[in-house]
Image (tube, rainbow, N blue to C red):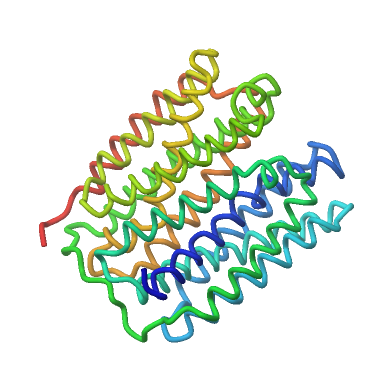
Amino acid sequence: MGRTRWSAIGLIATTYIYFLVFAQFGFLHRVRESLGEGHWNLVLGVMGLAGLAGALFTLACYRSAPGRRWLMAGFIGAGMGALLAAYGTQLYVFALSAGISGFFLSILTVSLVGVLADMLPTYRVGLVCGIGTGLAYFVSNVPLVFEASARGQSFFAALVCVGGLLCARGAPIPGASLRKPSGSVKWPWLALLGWVGVFMILIWSDSAAFTRIQETPALKAASWSGALHLWSLGMVHFFAAILAGFLMHTGRWKLLVASAFAGLLLGWLGLEQGVGVLLSAWIYAGAVSFYSTALVGFALLRGGDHKPVVWAGLVYGVSGWIGSAMGIGMVNDLGTVPPAFWVLACACLVGGLYLVERKVAA
């Protein structure tokens, strides 16, 4: 691979390692260590609102020419938020950390899509997104990282931001987009609404199920504990992301999204019922990598003639932050993922896919 592709892979990997290790997961554990769980909803709300604001700010103000500077600002701000959490002991410090982390992580994720549009031609998007996303999940499941203390994870996330800065500084970013239009969208805002709905359901489902797993000692011990389990899950994540990149490359979006939801549901049911626990955990991990890879690349490949940053900003802001907060909050309030939720989620997913597919061939 050339320098451009490796730089793009590095940017994707560092961005999503930070998200996976720190945002909400390590951060919430750090809050619990210092303050207990009584303030989770408050700091989650601050992070979610700041994330939504950051996404909307970026989609409105982003310009391609200084794209590298947007990335660098995002990495610096996200790293500062992680360091605040590492040293924080009081509620106002964690609230400040939540706000800074959410805002700058949104700047980072949305501007990353804009930079990738300037770095990668369409035919390379699937492979690069698959490798970058797979590496992020693999590193996040390395036992030394996954089982680190919440403070250790915060320091690690800040260190990852330093690596992201180096990738951003060395990225050879052209001045014009290399993305080829993928065909005009018949009803662009309906298609965008469809993507918002699709990813809202997938992120909500994943956030709820994973929170339930991590906060239930028996489930965590059976599925996400022990070096062997973690290494195997990391490998499943990596290869599933590569497969997802291939499906994106060949245009099999409905298969990709439907498989992701089916994997989340089947994996969760198996874990909850104690049926084939390790296999269920692998299925669940593969499903997460499927939709996460699609989340990175959908705006680059399915946005037609519309700016990828606008599509990414709205989907990341609404589906990402609100969906994630709703999933975590649902489990915190109910203690489980109700069966009725999966039924409604399936219906909403079908509706979202219908809107997404309302397009005219190129």
Q: Residue furthest left?
A: 361
Q: Quadrant of the N terminus?
A: bottom left
Name the spot of residue 140 as percent of width and height, x first.
60, 47
Q: Is residue 167 above or below residue 176?
A: above
Name the spot of residue 53 as percent of width and height, x first.
57, 63
Name the spot of residue 141 as percent of width and height, x first.
59, 43
Report the side of 92 relative to 120 (left or right).
Answer: right
Q: Is residue 330 above or below residue 19?
A: above
Q: Is residue 262 above or below residue 178?
A: above
Name the spot of residue 258 as percent of width and height, x first.
31, 35
Report the side of 337 relative to 355 (left or right).
Answer: right
Give the residue displayed 43% in from the left and 39% down from the top. Answer: 202
Q: Residue furthest right?
A: 89
Q: How many numbered marks appear?
A: 0
**In the foreground, 242 or 303:** 242
Q: Quadrant of residue 283?
A: top left
Q: Quadrant of the C terminus?
A: bottom left
Give the residue displayed 41% in from the left and 52% down from the top. Answer: 295
Report the side of 74 relative to 153 (left or right).
Answer: left
**In the foreground, 233 or 208:** 233
Q: Quadrant of residue 223?
A: top right
Give the residue displayed 80% in from the left and 37% down from the top. Answer: 38
**In the foreground, 183 or 154:** 154
